[in-house]
Amino acid sequence: MFQSLLLILLLIALFWAVAKFKKKPPAEARKLLLRSGIGALVIVLIMMAITGRMHWLFALIGALLPFTRGILGIGMQLLPFWLKRRQETQGSGQSQQQSQQGATRTDMSVKEAMDILGIKGEITSGEITSATVNDAHRRLIQKVHPDRGGNDYLAAKINHARDTLLKVIS
């Protein structure tokens, strides 16, 4: 009996909606059709969740569907501000790296480069070769490389010391 009454009410609502739909201009009719379709979908999802035929999370997701258009609209309005902020933070990060590199790329003396790499001896007498420099560099860079939890500054200093000594040797 209850199901029959519900079916009759549903048919009356359907005829009323069709009559109202026919009187609307095409643009408004499209909006009305979209809204009523989404509303019907939400009602069906809620009814399925109430009767236990669907998990309540799916009903919640379905109930949030009408709000996605508004959320996307707000997101599209905020997108330029987010992109601008992202560029500013990336730009400041690059300038900070460049300033660090600029600080490490100052002229380094041969003695300082040898001290950094832990090399003893004299370059002029031929005791220090490029192989010696490369071995010392490899040994140190494995300990302080940023990929292994080390420091960018120290790695840059070690690289600069190697470059300085290799220029003098060759």
Image (cartoon, rainbow, N blue to C red):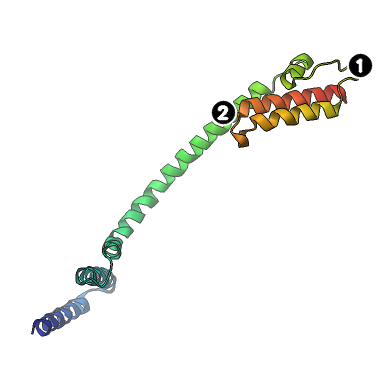
Crowding around mark 2 (Cα neighbors within 10 Å: few <14, some 14 to 19, many 20+) is: few
- Image location of residue 163, percent across then percent down: 77, 26
The residue located at (54%, 34%) in the rendering is 91
> Tag on residue 80?
none
Q: Gap in Å between the C-alphas at discs 2 and 1?
A: 40 Å
Quarter where residue 107 is shown? top right
- In the rendered structure, the answer to whether residue 81 lies left or right of residue 46 reads right
Question: Could you tell me which quadrant the N terminus lies in?
Answer: bottom left
Q: Which residue is nearer to you in this view: 165 or 8?
A: 165
Q: Helix, strand or loop at disc 1? A: loop
Q: Which residue is mark 2?
A: 96
Q: Which residue is nearer to you in this view: 61 or 23?
A: 61
Crowding around mark 1 (Cα neighbors within 10 Å: few <14, some 14 to 19, many 20+) is: few
Q: Which residue is nearer to you in this view: 134 or 81?
A: 134
- Does 148 appear above or below 105? below
Q: Helix, strand or loop at disc 2? A: helix
- Closer mark to the observer between disc 2 and disc 1: 1
What amino acid type should be assigned to the residue bearing mark 2? Gln
Q: Which residue is mark 1?
A: 125
What amino acid type should be assigned to the residue bearing mark 1? Ser
Quarter where residue 153 is shown? top right
- Image location of residue 8, percent across then percent down: 11, 84
- In the rendered structure, the answer to whether residue 83 lies left or right of residue 78 reads right
